[in-house]
Each structure stands twice: as structure tokens, then as C-alpha cells.
């Protein structure tokens, strides 16, 4: 018999719930985690200003009604320390730590068809066997590490938002550069600008950011506690996995004054529901440009220098084709006298020196450089593991883009389950909603196998092919593939550009995946 019924990789929100659920159903389950504590994303992303872009009351577990009632969120959009504290509370409340091994990174998985089990190897040399492996490795957990010429020569401090030191980093009065203006860069820039001596922002592509209007979690928390069951049910049937009123009348069929009024209303409300104002924003270029120009007008109103405002205004990709950022004063930062912007389309980074960075013909003297350069999204964490089955690696199979059935399994790799894998809603949704749906689907599938004396489950190639085609076809009905985004892996040199998330929405995905399960796991081979 293998050491475990199920081995779970990762002790983030997905891994914690998967462990709790499987233990409750009588499985011997164990988690292996590379970090020193639970929390996943919210353990590693400790950079200044790190914050969730989904409201706290919805970016939380729904599986235990008592947990919903007892945890006191302090802010509308929780910051990293609070989210990490929440993960630790869950681990302690359900006594999960006794079944978690910390400080070990999984380096290899090897499937034995004869024994119907995986051999799992850690970077400490440890070897475990498991009937099933569940990869709760996270969609944004493998950092992108661009190789800037001369980076090793830089004599100052070098930090990465993806692996920020656990001890305090004192930036007071220092000359600091931030490279990258995605969500991590935006949050870092906003947080440190009032503290540093000089802040130089190196921007390759400007972002569309909508205001958070962050504040106390109450009274929304009190209101949610009174109808959490209703909210959670609605979230699982919604496109995005969180409460968001989706406009039904196309923008192009709406009076311009009414369009502007609706944008104003959503802007004043704040949050990611802005792009849900009208259903054609992500399908029609004219409608999309109307929404984009509205946001650019808001940027111009916030940034006093017109030339700088234009540099901060995106014009090279459709709005919402990249995940929009939720900001807490980002654009206003550029009105500060100690903040400057380097547009890398005009002055590309040439090399690092001992003193700083040469961009264009200018050398910037720096004490600290912060790399906010993003992640090898969705596939990076799995590609980093040597996953082998039948003489083939998953990395080889996915060389031209990931291939899964429902984002849950990949043909040729039996008994390997993915939580929020490629071709599932994952990063286009409230991750907690999608995580819970996946974890429960996997738990039910393992219970079905156990009840029917089955030891092996594998996606069938033809069903996988159909699902990949469906995912691609749905994406191509939208404007989303027109952006060189990390949704396509465009931020990783040499990575095949394939649109990875399922754009059909959380509700549709739930109906399809649960229909597959109800049909005795149609499209899977159970033996």
C-alpha cells in the first residue's frame, strides 16, 4: 500500500481545504509545503502594500458556517498580514498542521502503472508514495525571473515582490527603483512612495486601475453574515465568483449620457465590477474603447502633469483583457516630487551597473531595486516539477501550451489532480470560489473511486482535446487574446502563447464539471 491515499502539494487556501475535506471523508491525506508556514500566496507575497482585489467577505471560505461568523475582517479589501493570519487561524482551528510537512519543495513525481501510485520526491531527499497526488500549487506561485544584463553587479539591495524578506526592510530616505507596474508593482509603489527618498518607476506597459475605496469591512460584513448561504450560492453560479451586477444592455445600444453615468456609478463604488457595466465591453472594440477612454480621463484628472498622465494611460491593449488592478492611490503617487517615471518603450533598460540601472542613455543611481516582474502563471509551478508517466514528462506534453480536461486532469497522467489548473476559470474569478468548487469536485471523485473499488482515474485524450478547443474558441469570441498578457504566458520568454483560463465563467464551468461527475465521470477512464 502507498504511504498515503492522497498527497497534496501546497498549503495555501486550496491545500488546506483539500486536506480538511479528505480527512473528513476518511482518507489518509498529507500536505507537503515549501514554505515555513501555511498561506500559499499570502505567505510568500509579503511585499509592502500587498492586498487582495476581491472583498474580504467573499475572499473567504464558505465550507464552515461557524468560521464565517467568527472571523472578524477589518478591511473591505484585506491586506497580506490579515489574510495570512486567516490562513493560520484555519490551520489551527481544524488541527491541520499535524498532517503538513513544511520546508520541503516537491521536485519530482513518478507514476507507476504497475503499483497504481505516485512516487513523490522532495528537495530534502525524502520519498513518499501516494495513490493520488493533488497539485494545489497555485496559479501565481512561480516567479518570473528576467535576466537583466549585469544584475549580479549591482551593489545595492535587491528585492523581489514574489519573495519579500520576512524581516523588515527599511526603505526610509533611500533611492529606490521598482521595475514592473502590474498589481504587485502598483501596490508596492503606492505603499512606499511616502517613505523613500526618491522613487523611480520603470514601466514597460501601463495598467488600467480602478479605485478600491478601501475602508472598514463593516457594515458589509454584518450584512453578509445575515445571508452568507445566499451569497455563496449566488457566487458559484455567477460569471466571476463574487457579487457583481452584470449589465445586460450593450453599451452600443445605450445613450452616451447613460453610459457615462453608469461608469461614474461603478467608479464611485470601486472594485473589479467596473468592466461588467455592459456585456459588449469585452467583445466589441468600439465599446471597449469607450470604457478605456473613460478610465484614461480619470487618470488625466488625477495626474497633474499631462505628459506624465499620457504615459500612464494604456493604449496598446483592450481594457480588461489583462486583469485590472484595484488601487488605493496609485496615480496620485506621481504628483509627488520624489517620484519619477521611466517609460521603457522610450528608454529600455540596457544593463545594471554597480551603482544602479542604465536605461536609454541615462544611469540612475540607486540604493534599492525592487523587481515586481510577475509570475510564470498557471503552468510555471507544475513545470518546475519533474512529473513523469509512461516515459513522458508533463513539461514535454505542455511544451506547446497546457492541455487538460476541465482544468482538473491531463491525459496520460493518471491520479494527478489539479486545483484551478489551466482551462478552468481560476485567475478570471474569485479564487476562493473556484478553489472550493475544485476541491469539492476532487474530493467527491476520490470518494466515488473508493466506493466503487477503483484505483485509477485518467482523462481521455479525445475529451481533453474537445475541452482545449472549447476553451480556445470561447476566448477567441472575446478581446482578451489581443493583449500580450500573462494569461497567454506572454511575459515569459520562449513560452508558447496560448490563452490559458476558461472564459465561460464560474457558473457555466460548475454546470459542466458537475454534469460530468453526475454522468459517472464522463470523459474519464476509471479502472
Image: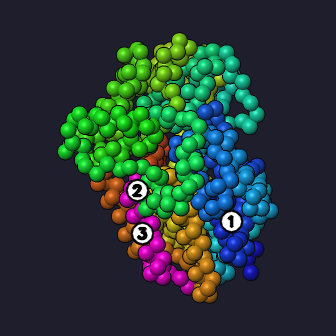
Of callouts 3 and 1, the N-terminal one: 1
Q: Position of residue 226 (x, y in %)?
A: 56, 55
Q: Is residue 8 above or below residue 277?
A: below
Label 3 and label 1: CA atoms lie apart by 25 Å
Label 3 or label 1, whichever lies nearer to me, is 3
- Regarding mark 2 in the picture, which secondary structure is present there? loop
Residue at 63% over, 83% down: 450
Q: How is the image coloured?
A: rainbow
- Check disc 2 and report the residue beneath it: 239
Give whichever of discs 2 and 1 has the lower sequence position.
Answer: 1
In front: 491, or 424? 424
* Left or right placement of residue 318 versus residue 416 in this view: left
Whether residue 30 sits left or right of residue 366 in the image: it is right
Tag 1's secondary structure?
A: helix
Q: Residue furthest right?
A: 98
Count neighbours of disc 2 (C-alpha within 10 A) and say few if under 14, some if 14 to 19, many if 20 or more: many
Provide residue 271's location: percent of width, then percent of height.
46, 40
Quadrant hosting residue 356:
top right
The label number, if any, that marks residue 19 in the structure image: 1
**Residue 159 seen anywhere in this rendered image of the structure:** yes
Is residue 87 in the magenta section?
no
- 508 within the magenta span: yes
Tell me the distance, in whole angstroms, between the alpha carbons under discs 3 and 2: 12 Å
Which marked residue is nearer to the observer: mark 2 or mark 1? Answer: 2
Local secondary structure at mark 3: helix
Q: Which residue, given by chain and number where applicable, does mark 3 sit on?
A: 511
| Left or right, residue 279 beside residue 131 | left
Question: The magenta stretch spans which residues?
Answer: 498-527
Amino acid at each position: 500500500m502507498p504511504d498515503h491515499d492522497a498527497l497534496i502539494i501546497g498549503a495555501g487556501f486550496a491545500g488546506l481545504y483539500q486536506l480538511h475535506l479528505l480527512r473528513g471523508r476518511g482518507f489518509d491525506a498529507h500536505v507537503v509545503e515549501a514554505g515555513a508556514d501555511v498561506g500559499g500566496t499570502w505567505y510568500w507575497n509579503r511585499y509592502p502594500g500587498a492586498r487582495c482585489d476581491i472583498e474580504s467577505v467573499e475572499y473567504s471560505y464558505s465550507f464552515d458556517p461557524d468560521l464565517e461568523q467568527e472571523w472578524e475582517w477589518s478591511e473591505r479589501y484585506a491586506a497580506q498580514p490579515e489574510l495570512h493570519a486567516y490562513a493560520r487561524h484555519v490551520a489551527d482551528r481544524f488541527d491541520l498542521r499535524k498532517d503538513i510537512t513544511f520546508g520541503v519543495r516537491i521536485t519530482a513525481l513518478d507514476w507507476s502503472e504497475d503499483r497504481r501510485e505516485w512516487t513523490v520526491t522532495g528537495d530534502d531527499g525524502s520519498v513518499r508514495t501516494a495513490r493520488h497526488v493533488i497539485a494545489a500549487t497555485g496559479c501565481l506561485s512561480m516567479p518570473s525571473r528576467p535576466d537583466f544584463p549585469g544584475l549580479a553587479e549591482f551593489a545595492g539591495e535587491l528585492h523581489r515582490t514574489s519573495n519579500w524578506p520576512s524581516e523588515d526592510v527599511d526603505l526610509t530616505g533611500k533611492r529606490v527603483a521598482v521595475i514592473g507596474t502590474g498589481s504587485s508593482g502598483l501596490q508596492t509603489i503606492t505603499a512606499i512612495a511616502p517613505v523613500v527618498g526618491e522613487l523611480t518607476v520603470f514601466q514597460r506597459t501601463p495598467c488600467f486601475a480602478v479605485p478600491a475605496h478601501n475602508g472598514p469591512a463593516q457594515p458589509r460584513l454584518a450584512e453578509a453574515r445575515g445571508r452568507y448561504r445566499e451569497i455563496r450560492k449566488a457566487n458559484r453560479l455567477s460569471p466571476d465568483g463574487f457579487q457583481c451586477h452584470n449589465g445586460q444592455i450593450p453599451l452600443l445600444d445605450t445613450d452616451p449620457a447613460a453610459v457615462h453615468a453608469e461608469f461614474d456609478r461603478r467608479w464611485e463604488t470601486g472594485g473589479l465590477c467596473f468592466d461588467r457595466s455592459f456585456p459588449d465591453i469585452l467583445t466589441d472594440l468600439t465599446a471597449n474603447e469607450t470604457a478605456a477612454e473613460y478610465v484614461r480621463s480619470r487618470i488625466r484628472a488625477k495626474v497633474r502633469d499631462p505628459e506624465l498622465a499620457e504615459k500612464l494611460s494604456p493604449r496598446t491593449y483592450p481594457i480588461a483583457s489583462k486583469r485590472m488592478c484595484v488601487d488605493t492611490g496609485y496615480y496620485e503617487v506621481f504628483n509627488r516630487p520624489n517620484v519619477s517615471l521611466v517609460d521603457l518603450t522610450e528608454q529600455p533598460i540596457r544593463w545594471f551597473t554597480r551603482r544602479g540601472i542604465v536605461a536609454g542613455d541615462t544611469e540612475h543611481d540607486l540604493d534599492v531595486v525592487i523587481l515586481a516582474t510577475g509570475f510564470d502563471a498557471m503552468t510555471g509551478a507544475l513545470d518546475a516539477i519533474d512529473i513523469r508517466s509512461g516515459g513522458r514528462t508533463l513539461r514535454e506534453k505542455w511544451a506547446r501550451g497546457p492541455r487538460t480536461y476541465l482544468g482538473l486532469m491531463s491525459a496520460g497522467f493518471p491520479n494527478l489532480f489539479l486545483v484551478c489548473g489551466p482551462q478552468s476559470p481560476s485567475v478570471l474569478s474569485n479564487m476562493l470560489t473556484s478553489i472550493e468548487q475544485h476541491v469539492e469536485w476532487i474530493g467527491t471523485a476520490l470518494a466515488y473511486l473508493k466506493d466503487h473499488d477503483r484505483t485509477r482515474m485518467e482523462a481521455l485524450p479525445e475529451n481533453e482535446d474537445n475541452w482545449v478547443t472549447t476553451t480556445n474558441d470561447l476566448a477567441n469570441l472575446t478581446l482578451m487574446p489581443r493583449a500580450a498578457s500573462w494569461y497567454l504566458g506572454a511575459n515569459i520568454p520562449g513560452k508558447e502563447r496560448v490563452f490559458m483560463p476558461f472564459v465561460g465563467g464560474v457558473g457555466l464551468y460548475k454546470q459542466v464539471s458537475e454534469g460530468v461527475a453526475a454522468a459517472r465521470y464522463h470523459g474519464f477512464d476509471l479502472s
